[in-house]
Image (cartoon, grey):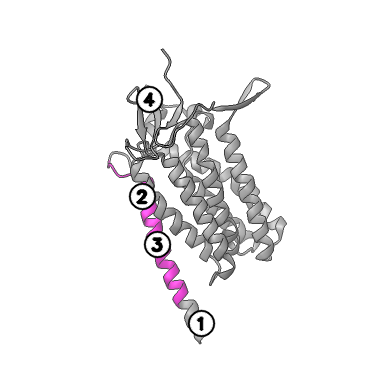
Amino acid sequence: MTADNSIVFPGLGISVDPSRTAFEIFGFSVYWYGVIIGIGFILGLLYALSRVKWEKIKEDDFLLVLIISLPVSVICARAYYVIFYSSLYFTDGKFDFMRAISIRDGGLAIYGGVIGAFLCAFIICRIKKISFLKVSDCVAVSFLIGQGIGRWGNFFNREAYGEITTLPWRMEIYDIASHARVCVHPTFLYESVWNLAGALILHIYYKKKKFNGEILLLYIAWYGLGRMFIEGLRTDSLYLFDTGIRVSQALAAVSFVCAVVIIIIARIKTKHREIG
């Protein structure tokens, strides 16, 4: 007997059963997850390019940073996941390298990707003598756009959901762990809405920024605040080995606090310079 994989929102009267596969080409399955991630990337890129012109950064320089940083971010996203889920990649005491690098089996951690992308961009900007802070401001809103749209890939994969709930917007799915249909928090939706709302707010504020790098810091603070609470609802969190600490939740909290502190200090310094 096969499991009922339909996705139902009982309180909203919605029931769907989307396939994970968007289409096949030459016998190769292309999943909706990848398609949606691609759409989020393209929309984010288009937004960033519009900001590049406003920041008076050469488009060729920006694209160079992007082309090099993108593959690095994917590698770092995978590495982050494998490190904290290392037990999944050992067979008979031996590390299975081929499984570890097979991203088609799932397992990309957004924090690893973001950290890798910004570190790579920082190095390239230093070499090319481009303003890293301006470049970061350009892509900060793009990250929120990409993350907000990309979370819908989790919907098609029936993953990244939360604990059991009876709230009106609960999502009913087949839970592999319990082998039963359960009603859970649609945490993918929470994060999608949070990120897209943040993108809109930062878009409106962008041209009013007080200093270069402020949009980046506001992105870190906004995303960190939301992820800190949403991660606490999820059932598939990465944990810091055997400590019981959710890695993403702890990192989100630290990121939020650090970003807010830096924003406050930078604004005070900016205000003093204006007065002086």
Quadrant of residue 200 within the rendered picture = bottom right
In the rendered image, which residue does mark 1 sit on?
A: 273
Q: Looking at numbered disc 3 in the image, what kind of residue is underneath it? A: Cys
**Residue 200 against residue 189 in the figure, above or below:** below
Residue range in magenta is: 243-268
In the rendered image, which residue does mark 3 sit on?
A: 258
Q: Is 255 one of the magenta-colored residues?
A: yes
- Sequence-first tag of 2 and 1: 2
Q: Looking at numbered disc 2 in the image, what kind of residue is underneath it? A: Phe
**CA gap, disc 4 and disc 1:** 58 Å
**CA gap, disc 4 and disc 3:** 38 Å
In the rendered image, which residue does mark 2 sit on?
A: 229
Q: Is residue 267 left or right of residue 121?
A: left
Of the numbered discs in the image, which one, if any, rests on residue 176? 4
Q: Are marks 4 and 3 in contact (CB under 8 Å)?
A: no
| Quadrant occupied by the N terminus | top left
- Sequence-first tag of 4 and 1: 4
Quadrant of residue 253 within the rendered picture = bottom left
Q: Percent from the top left, x then y, of residue 132? A: 58, 62
**Residue 127 against residue 90 in the figure, above or below:** below
Of the numbered discs in the image, which one, if any, rests on residue 52? none
**CA gap, disc 2 and disc 1:** 37 Å
Residue appearing at x 65%, y 20% in the figure = 27
**CA gap, disc 3 and disc 2:** 17 Å
Q: Secondary structure at mark 3?
A: helix
Q: Residue furthest left?
A: 243
Q: Secondary structure at mark 4?
A: loop
**CA gap, disc 2 and disc 4:** 24 Å
Q: Residues within 10 Å of mark 1 (few under 14, many from 20)?
A: few
Mark in front: 3 vs 2: 2
Q: Looking at numbered disc 1 in the image, what kind of residue is underneath it? A: Arg
